[in-house]
């Protein structure tokens, strides 16, 4: 998981945006619309980055459709030290 976190949050082009999403979700679970409003990004941009994070096991979705909220996965939480290091480097 450490390598995945470094790749999706620090090494790829969209990493800084995904790092912002992870930081926001670490504060509290939110849906895509709430994230878009809080971070000032377009809804479709947020959805794209959430899909990348979902596909890589960094976040999970609770609920269905529009109102689904996103949270960090247990794997991401288990790698808290690495996650904090990356967020401190990127943000």
Image (tube, rainbow, N blue to C red):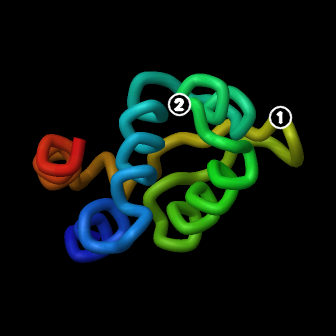
Determine the image quadrant of residue 34.
top right
Residue 63: x and y in percent read 79, 42
Q: CB under 8 Å between callouts 2 and 1? A: no
Q: Look at mark 2 in the image and give the residue it sits on.
A: 39
Q: Which of marks 2 and 1 is nearer the N terminus?
A: 2
Q: Look at mark 1 in the image and give the residue it sits on.
A: 67
Residue 41: x and y in percent read 61, 39
Residue 84: x and y in percent read 17, 43
Quarter holding the N terminus is bottom left
| Gap in angstroms between the C-alphas marked 2 and 1 | 18 Å
Determine the image quadrant of residue 45.
bottom right
Q: Is residue 55 above or below residue 74?
A: below
Residue 43: x and y in percent read 73, 44
Q: Give neighbour class at mark 1: few <14, some 14-19, many 20+ (Cα, 10 Å).
A: some
74 and 10: which one is in front? 10
Between circles 2 and 1, the one closer to the viewer is 2
Q: Which mark is on residue 13?
A: none
Q: In this view, does 3 lie to the left or right of 8?
A: left
Determine the image quadrant of residue 12.
bottom left
Q: Residue shown at 38%/70% (left/top)?
A: 13
Which element is circle 1 on? Answer: helix
Which element is circle 2 on? Answer: helix
Q: Residue shown at 70%/40% (left/top)?
A: 32
90 and 60: which one is in front? 90
Q: Residue lying furthest right in this view?
A: 65
Q: In this view, does 39 lie above or below 47?
A: above
36 and 68: which one is in front? 36
Quarter holding the C terminus is top left
Q: Is residue 9 left or right of residue 91?
A: right
Q: In this view, does 19 lie to the left or right of 84?
A: right
Q: Residue shown at 43%/63% (left/top)?
A: 14
Q: Residue shown at 74%/53% (left/top)?
A: 44
């Amino acid at each position: 998981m450490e390598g995945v976190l470094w790749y999706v949050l620090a090494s790829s082009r969209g990493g800084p945006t995904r790092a912002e999403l992870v930081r926001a979700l670490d504060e509290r679970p939110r849906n895509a619309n709430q994230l878009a409003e809080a971070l000032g990004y377009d809804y479709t941009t947020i959805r794209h980055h959430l899909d990348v994070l979902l596909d890589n096991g960094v976040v999970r979705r609770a609920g269905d459709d529009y109102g689904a909220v996103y949270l960090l996965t247990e794997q991401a939480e288990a790698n808290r030290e690495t996650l904090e290091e990356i967020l401190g480097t990127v943000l």
